[in-house]
Amino acid sequence: MIKDYFFEEEHHIFRETVRRFVQKEVAPKIEEWEEKGCYDKAIFPRMGELGLLGLRYPEEYGGQGADIKTSLVFWEEMCRCGALGFPMSLFVHTDMASPSLAHVGTHEQKEKFLKPICAGEKLLAIAMTEPNHGSDLASIKTRAVREGDYYRVNGSKMFITNGTQADVINTVVRTGGPGHKGISLLLIETKIPGFSVSRKLEKMGMHSSDTTELIFEDCLVPTENLLGEEGRGFYALMQGLEMERLSGSALSYMGAELALEEAIKYATQRIQFDQPIVNFQAIGHMIADMATAVEAGKRLVYHCAMMYEAGIRCNKEASMAKLYCSEMALRVVDKAVQIHGGYGYMKEFPVERLYRDLKLITIGAGTSQIQKNVILTEMGLRG
């Protein structure tokens, strides 16, 4: 059993439970999912049965009412499945697309959507980015025009995780004028007429996660699916960004930790000049640097998590964690590949996949450059 002063006995027990689940029911399927370019959606109801999909959400809506340390354990152990693509899709469902529903959704919306989301009966995605609008979210063009009891939605979304599998899309739309004050959130069910997946996108990495372009053509969405107040969608999204960044940070430091573990294993087994290469100072120092960087990133995320749990605003710190951990993971996995030499470039070695998968984390959920802007703003150095 893994011990850590930060976690309590209940978290260690939960860790062992999740680790066994991953080893038995997820890891054996990863190669198939990577080859297919998407996970098997049937895994979600199974996770719902085990209570893994709504850890922090109220029991009233199918959640577990657990603390954020439980989420940290969940994030860490799911990343041990053999690829980072599936955990990313999973975290979109549990920690990126659903927080705004939990924060500002009505009781009726939570009954209709959050309950089946926690049960794994409905899969959730979030649609913000558009073909011509990414980091500048306030400029999105997808339009929702109210017509009686419906919104007529027209537009497109790009780089949407879970796009081919989702039953519900938490969609950023424009209901008002320019800027963030004209933005609203609509829960759009993918079965409605006018919704389509334009194409599934081929990616460098994260192959066990699907990424798509979505099209909305005169989609009639009931006004009861408006999440929060009209024109307040941007603020509802901001309430969930801390959790989005923390889960992405955990994905990053775990990818780095896995790369470190692989580097240590290889360096202790690879014999050159009649001794393991870990004995050479150049290799040993690389591993020491990698271990230090991983530990620093992990503890920064733990610090942010406790701020969040205590109800202390941590937008700056969460952005720092996302920035540091994603960039750190790239440095660590690069060293891991280098330690492997030519073998690190071969697909039969895990570091090759980690190298491809981890690049996305510096781009998705807010690029490193956007995180720096957020940090400067929170420091009072930007307007």
Image (tube, rainbow, N blue to C red):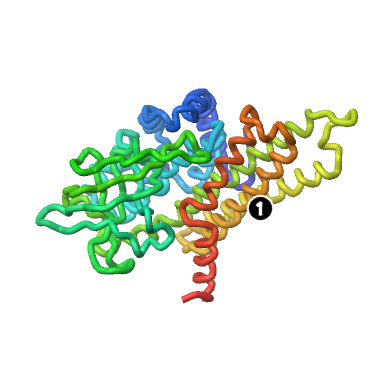
Q: Position of residue 66 (x, y in %)?
A: 44, 44
The single residue placed furthest to the right in the displayed view is 274
User: What residue would you read off at disc 1?
Assistant: 296
Q: Is residue 45 above or below residue 339?
A: above
Q: Position of residue 86 (x, y in %)?
A: 47, 36
Q: Of 278 and 208, which appears nearest the observer?
A: 208
Asked where in the image residue 52 lies, by quadrant, the reply is: top left
Q: Position of residue 295 (x, y in %)?
A: 67, 49
Picture residue at 53% right of the left edge, 49% below the top: 361
Asked where in the image residue 280 lies, by quadrant, the reply is: top right
Picture residue at 57% right of the left edge, 40% below the top: 356
Picture residue at 33% right of the left edge, 50% below the top: 157
| Left or right: 359 in relation to 190 | right
Picture residue at 80% right of the left edge, 46% below the top: 285
| Left or right: 297 in relation to 380 | right
Asked if residue 175 shows in the view, the reply is yes
Q: Position of residue 374 (x, y in %)?
A: 50, 66
The single residue placed furthest to the left in the displayed view is 148
Q: Of 5 and 320, which appears nearest the observer?
A: 320
Amino acid type of the residue that numbered disc 1 sits on in the rendered structure: Ala
Q: Quadrant of the N terminus?
A: top right
Q: Is residue 72 above or below residue 261?
A: below
Q: Of 12 and 218, which appears nearest the observer?
A: 218
| Left or right: 268 in relation to 250 | right
Asked if residue 64 shows in the view, the reply is no
Q: Of 341 and 32, which appears nearest the observer?
A: 341
Please give the count of numbered marks on the rendered protein. 1
